[in-house]
Image (cartoon, grey):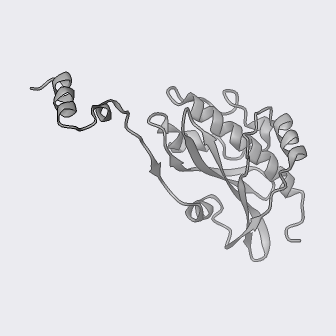
Amino acid sequence: MISRRETLRRMAGSGVAAAALWQTRAFAATFMDIDEARKVLLPRATSFEPVALELGAPQISQLAAATQTQVPRGYAPLAWAGFAQDKRVGWVMSDRAIGKYELIDFAAGFEADGSVSGLEILAYRESHGAEIRTPAWRKQFVGRKGPEQLRFNDDIRNISGATLSCQHVTEAVQRLSLLAQQLAQKPART
C-alpha cells in the first residue's frame, strides 16, 4: 500500500497538483425548488401571486429591533401570497441563511393569520448539520406566530453539530414571521 506522502510525491513529479488531495469536499444538495415548496407549504392555495416586500432602511431597522437579530446586508427575501377561490389563504416566503460557512436556502409557509404552516430546506451546502432537514426539527416551527414564539434554544431547540445552521435559520424565520404578520394586516389584493 502506498502512503499518502508517497502518493503526493508521485503526483507532484507527474505534474498533477498535489494540493487537490488536501482540499475538503464540497457538499451541496438541492432538495426542491420554490414552486414545489409553495405547494407543500400552502397546499390549499390554488394560485400564487408575488408580493413586493417594503424593505427600506427604516423597515430593516424595525425588523432588527423587533426580532433582536442582525439583518444581513442586502436582505431580500421573496414572498408570494397564496389564494384559493380568490381568498388569500397565506404566504410562502423564501430566504437564505448562513450555516457555518455556506448559505442555506429555505422557504417558510404562513397561514392567513401569520402563523407558520411549515418550513422546507431547499438547498443545503454545508458538510455538517444537514439534520435541520429532519421533519422533527422543522415541525417545531409549525403553529408559531411572531418572532417572540420563535426564539432559538427557548422555543426552537438546537441540534448538536448543527448549532449555527439551527440558529441562523431560526433567526431568519423570525424575520419572515414578522413580515407575515405585517402582510396579514394588509388587504388581500390592492
Q: Is residue 132 left or right of residue 85?
A: left
Question: x, y percentage for residue 87?
Answer: 79, 71
Q: Nearer the viewer, residue 135 or 65?
A: 65
Task: Point out the residue furthest to the bottom here.
Answer: 85
Residue located at (22% from left, 37% from top): 15
| 67 vs 50: above or below | above
Q: Quadrant of residue 103?
A: top right
**The N terminus - image quarter:** top left
Q: Quadrant of residue 43?
A: bottom right
| 104 vs 184: above or below | above
Residue located at (76% from left, 33% from top): 69
Q: Quadrant of residue 39?
A: bottom right
Residue located at (57% from left, 36% from top): 99
- Count of numbered marks: 0
Question: x, y percentage for residue 174?
Answer: 74, 41
Residue located at (74% from left, 47% from top): 176
Question: x, y percentage for residue 168?
Answer: 64, 35
Q: Nearer the viewer, residue 47 or 75?
A: 75
**The C terminus - image quarter:** bottom right
Q: Is residue 23 left or right of residue 163?
A: left
Q: Is residue 48 left or right of residue 98?
A: right
| 116 vs 68: above or below | below
Q: Nearer the viewer, residue 34 or 115?
A: 34
Question: x, y percentage for residue 107?
Answer: 63, 53
